[in-house]
Image (spheres, grey):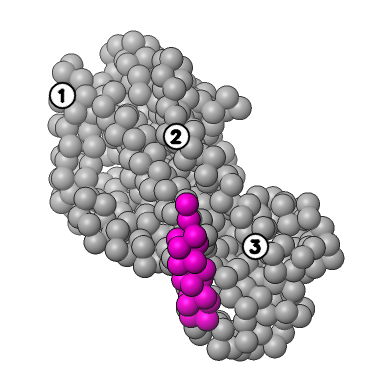
Amino acid sequence: MTESREPIGVIGVGWVGLVTAACFAELGHRVVARDILAEKVDSLSRGELTIHEPGLSDLLSRNSERLTFTTDMGELLGSARLLFVCVDTPPTRSGDADLSRVRSVVEELRADGDHMLIMKSTVPAGTGETIRRDLPDVAYVSCPEFLKEGSAVADFMHPDRVVIGADPADEAAGDAVAALYEPLGGEIVRTDVSSAEMIKLASNAFLATKISFVNEIANVCEEVGADVGEVARGMGLDQRIGPSFLRAGIGYGGSCFPKDVSALKMLAGNTGYHFQLLNAVIEVNELQKRRVVQKLLGHLGSLVGKRVALLGLAFKPHTDDMREASSLVLAARLQGEGADVVAYDPVAAGAARDLLGGVELRDSALEALDRADAAVLVTEWPEFAELDWTEAATRMARPLLIDGRNFLDPKALISTGFEYEGIGRQSADDRHSSASVARSRAEHAP
């Protein structure tokens, strides 16, 4: 590809910043990416990834001549006019977004009037207005990211939409950002800054709401003898609903949904509006992580001295991200009930080691299942579908599996000797009896 005449700067090379930098380099731009952590910059300069993201290593290797990493803000400012801000905005203790890293960037640009600031970081609506007041001579554009961990490179290269928020005084800057994304083919949504900021928060909050809703439906399904998989399939065929994010499980996690739902709730609360629906979404998600413990207690009675294997630790497959992972809550609750917890994850063990005190980490799923009284599938890694479950059953003290993601085939597991329980899901053996119980309840209802 030909070199871009307009180099691009990226501030912050965490997950969003690194994907953004590598993908723009793949599109032919010269990219200078700056981070304050010298160790991270040194590793990336050597071509060593600091995160696990499919396809990202190939992009870094292929575009090493176009992609530069530095700790020097002066080098960045001297190399690029278009600056993508990709710094972290984690939640504070109050639930508000921590904007301290964003403010640090603003301080470094306070005396500058030659650059365009393009906000990729997720910030509360109204942040852009504040920055425009602080940096009156710097053009400002809101361009929130909608990447999914585990498929971020593909998401960047094939977006369903690109949101660009620019107020009238910065329309030229908005045009420049739109031109960067036009080759990717996604629909470009032009709007004002505050609306762009809200689109990001509202999108993630809505997806989190779908997850909590289907988990509540799953819990009701368990009570009435229905199968949430069948229910979700029937719901998803309605074009007004759609099938995405209707898979029941043990709750959402990661860096986006928990943070953005909380941030939107607090944003509303700070204006005096009580966002009651989001309170319920958060509560359902937290309780859902704990329901697995109740399922295990139902099968085993007490968990004291029982050996429980967790299969998967990352919040989702194809990433090593442990932020708000369900495994963290689950492991702590199991230990609180007196269980000995052993775990395996094909990628996230290193990231999880310091977060899971007292949990034994194993090098394979079969090793984790050795002598276990029960297993919980926490993360739907593809390798678990290919596992020799017949051998697994012979290795376990009791072949009991709680499928926290409804990922495996109940019939296949039962045929190998497993006791199987999913989330809101009926196995082939108990579907008839559960339906009978439901009919009996209906017949005797007042």
Q: Inspect the image, locate mark 1, and give the three-letter code of the amino acid beneath it.
A: Glu
How many residues crowd mark 3 within 10 Å: few (<14), some (14–19), many (20+)? some
| Mark 1, secondary structure of its residue | helix
Which image quadrant is residue 419 in? Answer: bottom right
Residue under label 3: 295
Q: Is residue 289 left or right of residue 124?
A: right
| Mark 2, secondary structure of its residue | helix
Which mark's residue is nearer the viewer, 1 or 3? 3
| Mark 3, secondary structure of its residue | helix
Q: Residue at x 59, y 52 (%)?
A: 289
Residue 197, horizontal then vertical, whole percent: 32, 29
Residue under label 1: 171
**Mark 1 vs mark 3, CA separation in Å:** 56 Å
Of the image marks 2 and 3, the number of the one nearer the N terminus: 2
Using the image, determine if residue 442 lies above or below residue 419: above
Which circle marks residue 278 in the picture?
2
Q: Report if the CB atoms under discs 2 and 3 are less than 8 Å apart.
A: no
Is residue 369 visible in the rendered image? The answer is: yes
Which mark's residue is nearer the viewer, 2 or 3? 3
Magenta residues, start to end? 425-446
Which of the pair 213/126 is nearer the observer?
213
Q: Inspect the image, locate mark 2, and give the three-letter code of the amino acid beneath it.
A: Leu
Q: Residue at x 30, y 58 (%)?
A: 235
Of the image marks 1 and 3, the number of the one nearer the N terminus: 1
